[in-house]
Amino acid sequence: MVEQRDPPRGRATSLSRASGAMALATMVSRISGLFAKLLLVWVLGLGVINDSYTVANTLPTVVNELLLGGVLTSVAVPLLVSARRNSEEEGEAYAQWMITMGVVLLGVATVLAVLAAPLLTELYLGPHTRANRELTTAFAFLLLPGIVFYGMSAMLMAILNVRQVFGPPAWAPVMNNVVITAAVLLYTAVPGQITLDPVRMSQPKLLVLGLGTMLGIAAQSAVMMLSLRRTGFRFRWRWGWDRRLSEFGALAGWVVLYTLVSQIGMIVTIRVAGQGTPGSVATFHYAWLLSQVPYGVLGVSLLQALMPRISRSADQGDTESFVHDVGLGARLSAMLLMPVSALMLTGGSAIGVAFFSLGQGTIGAADRLGVTLGVAAAGIVPFAITMLQLRAFYAMKDARTPMLINVGMVAFRAVLCYALLMVLDPRDLVIGVTLAMSLSFLVGAVVGQVWLHARLGSAQTRETLVGIGWALLATAAGCLGAALALRPAAGVLAGLGEIAGAWGDLTIRAALVLGIGFGLMLLLPIPEMAMARTRLRRVLDRLRGT
């Protein structure tokens, strides 16, 4: 058993500063992304056209993850840290080789994927879908060239993070969202409509939406290219082979298998959801993306700040610091995300009606999206802990264990999805597949923690369970307070109308669930909240001084 100790104050302060800066940037990114998604629903509704666009927009990310994206975001950081530790020149040379490899691989993959667009569409839609195959394929032809830019963004973000540059990668998606928002606004101004029978590639609205979406990720990649250049990095083509490349290949093979298993799970999920009522695929997609907003703002920022530290500790054989940082990350993830998850779970219907019932959206479709969002949000904390655990294994240069854990998660999810397909009404099917997704991450988090404990002798399991328990207690108190406050207000809110009532419900619920939840965590004797309490006291002291 390894004795645990708290990290030096400088390490905690550094983590807080890095994750705080990224959280601000990511919050702006997620808010602008949410606005872009809202515009899409307002303009397209939650029907066949949005289903087709959503599936096609998934394809470039799938191909990129299978070939390179998953590898870079998982194993590149540990290997770049190791190379950079030897010397600055060696680290730069390794980064140059990665870019060379990535450009060639992504370029070939993009050409092949565009040629195979009809086959990819058929693979994801299946024979019983209610999406439009021809329209999905038309969108795919326009969106699949984005594979290059998705891969480049992942690659450049990994290199920037190793160089302790976190701000630009966090701000870059804002440019993507700005471009997509502009494309949707242009879509509304362009005359005509997207026809389904027949589908014509020359239709201006189809071209504006497809090419605008692809150009958005290109703009994001360009921002990171400029940021990397400002750090002093200069690119040159690097070919050849050495021992580091063999190490990368061994790890990358397992990560590709991991990603392949994940995509099998996603194919099952989309195919089952596609057998529900029209708009089910888009509903699942938007609910999942919305549930990821708090994780993107808080969890990803924390993970990106922790990952270089965890990688350095693993590379140097510092098990004590490694275990501490992984445990700290799990506890902070639960404490930061639990109240937000509870707000979405209990107020999902209000969120859906408040945000998605305007324009082409209907109250019924918006309510179903909100309920689906609540079910997806129930899996946020297990998802965040699972992602942290997987990165911990990658930092130990073990890509085999995450793949095996993922096999169990996907098998559980697939069996549950098809079981629900046999018993649920088509209207409720999207909620069922979302539940299967959330429960699979709970399975992954439990298995990952047990595996880490067996591997390290101690993974701060007891401390993590205590931290999750405190977060649950504070969050439950917030939910109870909201329920008690909303009961007498139900009649007044109903009299305001459905949309205004939803906004009123959401405002009261958010204030109480988040206010009581986070407030109690600050008051309770939770060690991980000590830094937040110190900062709050300083702010209050300044206010008193003024």
Image (spheres, rainbow, N blue to C red):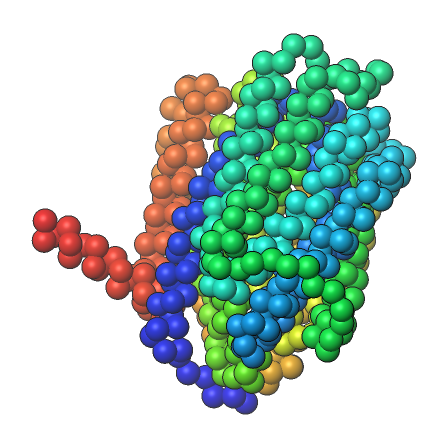
x and y percent of residue 202 in the render? 77, 18
Q: Residue at x 51, y 28 (%)?
A: 355
Left or right: residue 354 versus residue 393 is left
Left or right: residue 339 versus residue 265 is left
Q: For this rendering, which residue is in front, 158 or 439?
A: 158
Q: Residue at x 56, y 72 (%)?
A: 89
Q: For this rendering, which residue is in front, 543 or 417?
A: 543
Left or right: residue 51 versus residue 528 is right
Q: Is residue 294 above or below residue 198?
A: below
x and y percent of residue 217 in the render? 61, 40
**Furthest residue toward top:** 191
Q: Residue at x 43, y 22 (%)?
A: 500
Does the rendering let one see residue 244?
yes
Q: For this rendering, which residue is in front, 137 or 222?
A: 222
Q: Is residue 95 above or below residue 149?
A: below
Q: Residue at x 66, y 45 (%)?
A: 149
x and y percent of residue 230 in the render? 47, 54
x and y percent of residue 246 in the render? 76, 74
